[in-house]
Every structure is written in C-alpha cells, then in structure tokens.
Image (cartoon, rainbow, N blue to C red):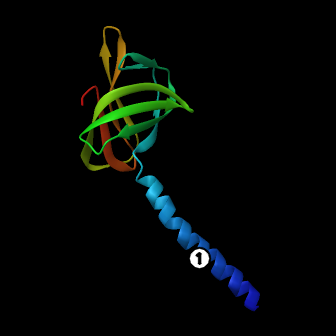
Amino acid sequence: MQMKHVKYLAFLSTLALLFPVGALARDKNERTVDIPDSVQVGAEHLKPGDYKVEWQGDGPAVQVRFFQGRNLVATVPGTLKTNDREVTQDDVVVQNKANGKVLMEIDFGRGKEAIILGQG
C-alpha cells in the first residue's frame, strides 16, 4: 500500500513541475490561425490553411512572420494591440482590393491580442 502512495506522490510532483513550463509556453509571441481564403500579406500571397503567426518585439511595432509547417512564407511589419475584451475565436479581417483580398488584421481567439498588418 505504501508503494502506491509513493507512485501517486511522484506523479503529482511531476505534474506540479510541468505546469509552470506549460504556462511559460503560452507567453511566447506566437499563435496558430486558420486563414480561410487566399490573401495577400505584404508582397506574398497566402493560400488557405493553417499558419503559425509569430511576432518579434513587445509592441506596439512588431515584425510578423507567417509559417506554414516549418516554412517561412511571409514577413511583414505590424502593430500589436490589445483588445478591450477577450476574443472567443480567431477573427481574420480582410479587405477586398482591386488585386484580391488583403489580410489587414488577426484577432487571436482565447486572448486579447491582435495584430494589425502593414503598420509598424
């Protein structure tokens, strides 16, 4: 019976050690977003799909990088902003231009962060 308690205590201790690591990973300046339509980002055209969006800097001016898988597909200047309230799901804001749809803003779900593109 004593060994069962030791294993349980070891398991709980491991979880307690791993929890702060998970919390720190959330603080990274990156999120994943689904872009449903073909859009222009800077000089690049992004096809529909999932992208890792990563920004460098604490804001408001940041450099924003888009990855599809491990491939860097676009880098553009942007502005990091904080919304007044938490967004429940990702929101991709596009604007129709003469040459197609242009990605203007990404509001990240489950947080207050947003990136406005093309500024910085």
Residue density around tag 1, few if under 14, some if 14–19, many if 20 or more, within 10 Å: few
The residue that label 1 is drawn on is 13
Judge whether 100 appears above or below 61 on screen.
above
Q: Residue at x 44, y 42 (%)?
A: 31
Judge whether 99 appears above or below 71 on screen.
above
Q: Nearer the viewer, residue 107 or 66?
A: 66
Left or right of 98 on screen, residue 48: right
Give percent across and percent down for residue 79: 26, 35
Q: Residue at x 47, y 54 (%)?
A: 25
Q: Residue at x 65, y 78 (%)?
A: 10
The residue lying furthest to the top in this view is: 98
Left or right of 75 on screen, residue 4: right
The residue lying furthest to the bottom in this view is: 2
Q: Residue at x 31, y 36 (%)?
A: 115
Judge whether 29 appears above or below 19 on screen.
above
Disc 1 on helix, strand or loop?
A: helix
Q: How many marks?
A: 1
Give percent across and percent down for residue 65: 41, 32
Q: Nearer the viewer, residue 76 or 8?
A: 76
Q: Quadrant of the C terminus?
A: top left
Left or right of 10 on screen, residue 29: left
User: Mark 1: which amino acid?
Assistant: Ser
Q: Quadrant of the N terminus?
A: bottom right
Give percent across and percent down for residue 17: 54, 70
Judge whether 82 appears above or below 14 on screen.
above
Q: Nearer the viewer, residue 41 or 83?
A: 41
Give percent across and percent down for residue 47: 50, 21
Give residue 13's quadrant in the image. Answer: bottom right
Left or right of 27 on screen, residue 77: left
